[in-house]
Image: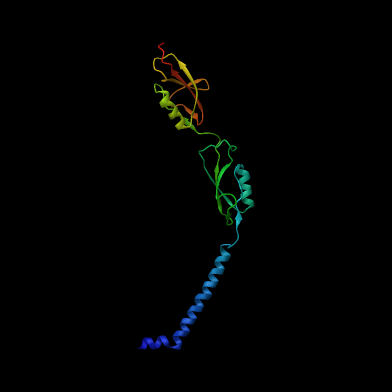
């Protein structure tokens, strides 16, 4: 009975009311401080940096109070100049806070070099998809007298014979010397 009497007393109701007011005041102060501390409602627009050099991108980001983080790229894109920005995250036009990091992917100086596989004594039907899967292009098909029709006898690049393990840039054109099915 004492507990019920205490819960109905003026002293208890006064304490509950003071606690509620204190929570409301502290919440209001905390929300105002948080709004000021996080610059609530203040944004910077991310500029479009694609195609720009690294130095120009860095200056543009500094003017907009943004930071830059360069990510390495192994994918050469011939549509953009060497060492220019090919991708950015967040994308252009996004609204971000001051001093936010903008992640930039840079175009390398050229295609990476890939090892040439051993295709001698393989058929054209096997060699062509293998080369294309690696990123090479099949150029001229040169036929020589050999009993095995469409068997790869030799691989060439820019008129020079290439061997297994040689490194060529991706998208390099490889000419194949094939047997024509005639006895030598």
Total numbered labels? 0
Position of residue 99 relative to residue 155, above or below, is: below
Indicate how the structure is coloured in the image.
rainbow
**Taking 42 as reference, is 26 left or right?**
left
| Position of residue 162 measured from the top left corner of the image (x, y, whole percent) | 47, 22
Closer to us: 150 or 60 = 150
| Position of residue 63 measured from the top left corner of the image (x, y, whole percent) | 64, 51
User: Can you say which quadrant of the picture contains the N terminus?
Assistant: bottom left
Determine the residue located farthest toward the left in the rendered image. 1
| Position of residue 110 measured from the top left corner of the image (x, y, whole percent) | 54, 34
Closer to us: 153 or 16 = 153
| Position of residue 81 measured from the top left corner of the image (x, y, whole percent) | 60, 37
User: Could you say which quadrant of the image residue 109 lies in?
Assistant: top right
**Taking 19 as reference, is 121 left or right?**
left
Which residue sits at x=63%, y=48%? 60
Which residue sits at x=62%, y=51%? 62
Determine the residue located farthest toward the top in the rendered image. 184
User: Can you say which quadrant of the picture contains the C terminus?
Assistant: top left
Position of residue 94 relative to residue 155, above or below, is: below
Position of residue 137 relative to residue 108, above or below, is: above
Position of residue 43 relative to residue 55, above or below, is: below
Which residue sits at x=45%, y=87%? 11
């Amino acid at each position: 009975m004492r507990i019920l009497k205490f819960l109905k007393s003026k002293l208890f109701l006064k304490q509950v009311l003071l606690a509620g007011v204190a929570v409301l005041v502290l919440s209001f102060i905390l929300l105002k401080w948080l709004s000021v501390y996080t610059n609530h409602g203040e944004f910077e627009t991310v500029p479009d940096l694609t195609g720009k050099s690294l130095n120009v991108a860095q200056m543009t980001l500094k003017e907009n109070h943004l930071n830059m983080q360069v990510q390495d790229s192994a994918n050469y894109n011939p549509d953009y100049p060497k060492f220019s920005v090919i991708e950015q995250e967040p994308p252009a036009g996004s609204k971000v806070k001051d001093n936010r990091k903008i992640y930039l992917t840079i175009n390398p100086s050229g295609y990476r070099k890939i090892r040439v596989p051993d295709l001698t004594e393989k058929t054209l039907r096997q060699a062509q998809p293998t080369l294309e899967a690696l990123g090479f292009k099949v150029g001229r098909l040169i036929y020589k007298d050999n009993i095995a029709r469409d068997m790869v006898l030799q691989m060439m690049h820019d008129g020079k014979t290439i061997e297994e393990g040689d490194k060529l840039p991706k998208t390099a054109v490889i000419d194949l010397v094939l047997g024509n099915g005639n006895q030598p």
